[in-house]
Amino acid sequence: METPLKDIHKKLKARFTDFVGWKMPLQYSSIVEEVKAVRSKVGIFDISHMGRILLEGKDVKEKLQFLTTNNIGKLSVGRVQYNLFTNEKGGVKDDITVYKLAEDKFFLCVNAVNKEKIIKWLSEFCSPRDMSEDYLQIAVQGPESESVLSKFFNVSDIRYYGFKTFGDTIVSRTGYTGEDGFEVYINPKEGIELFEELVRLAVPCGLGARDILRIEAGFPLYGNELSESITPFEANLDRFVDTNKDFLGKEEMLRKGVKKKLFGLELQDKGIPRKGYFEIALEPFVFAADQFWSIPLTINTFCRREYLVSKYSIG
């Protein structure tokens, strides 16, 4: 599969990669330069491969409250909430962002790899509407993102994790890079025109840069740090779990406790430890499986996203 921006990517001589069945830009110039652009100025990403789902109805809020770990009741209209779907055992089905359009209307952004699974699962509780083909999704990220996007939309008054609508277009102050930034949900025709204009004002960036940026920022990627066998507590996402409310998998999640937990590690030396060649002594933890290397180009060292296993239950 390809996004509607494919012709622009080819014109920009993007190098492509397969990402969960999508032909996506890995890089345009160099991953190093793309990362630096986002950290110092502004970069743009085609993230149209993500899934977009609409939920509406008089009881959809209550159902969404039960299916997610964060408290939907605290979400007001015009705000976005990071949230998690969990299974009966407390494992993460997907990590999502929830947009509250109205009291009985919610817009979800889900991971591309999980879209079909989530729609099928949600259908057991409500009537999800797949809006993925109705929108392009463009991320504008970096310190200069507001000044660039302000040429097209009035975004200066959008707060962090807030959004505004411009007709059918949704613009939120959200992102996956750790920098100030926005995500634009726009119909394909207008989205192609917008991306063509943005290319003149910002650096096009691919999935290679996006992965480094999100690891530096400490954001998880489903299929790497997150899966149906990993709980939010293990993934160090405790702050997005409200145990004062009921949700699917809560009792099992609390019963199991936590014997492994995701940490970000920064190496002091430049060498790259290989699997089985080193051990971490961090009571009450001992080293677990190797995972998730990155070279954080902006801090000039190596960091690691790693699950450490405890000798004892710690939660």
Image: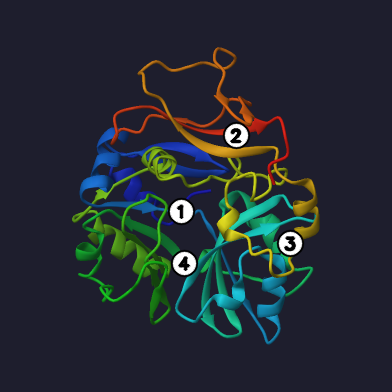
Vertical placement of 48 versus 269: above or below? Answer: below
Which amino acid type is shown beneath numbered disc 4?
Answer: Tyr
In the depicted view, which residue is nearer to us: 43 or 251?
251
Q: Which circle's residue, 1 or 4, is located before the other in the chain?
A: 1
| Residue hosting label 1 | 3
Q: Amino acid at mark 3?
A: Lys
In terms of sequence position, does the residue under pointer 4 or pointer 3 come before the other? 3
Disc nearer the start of the sequence (3/1): 1
Point 24% across, 52% down: residue: 42
Disc 3 residue crowd, few under 14, some 14–19, many 20+, Cα 10 Å: few
Instruction: Choose between 162 and 205: the one closer to the eye.
Output: 162
Nearer the observer: mark 3 or 2; the answer is 2
Residue 54 visible within the image: yes
Residue that numbered label 3 is attached to: 120
Mark 2 lies on residue: 307
Q: Amino acid at mark 2?
A: Tyr
Q: Nearer the viewer, mark 4 or mark 3?
A: 3
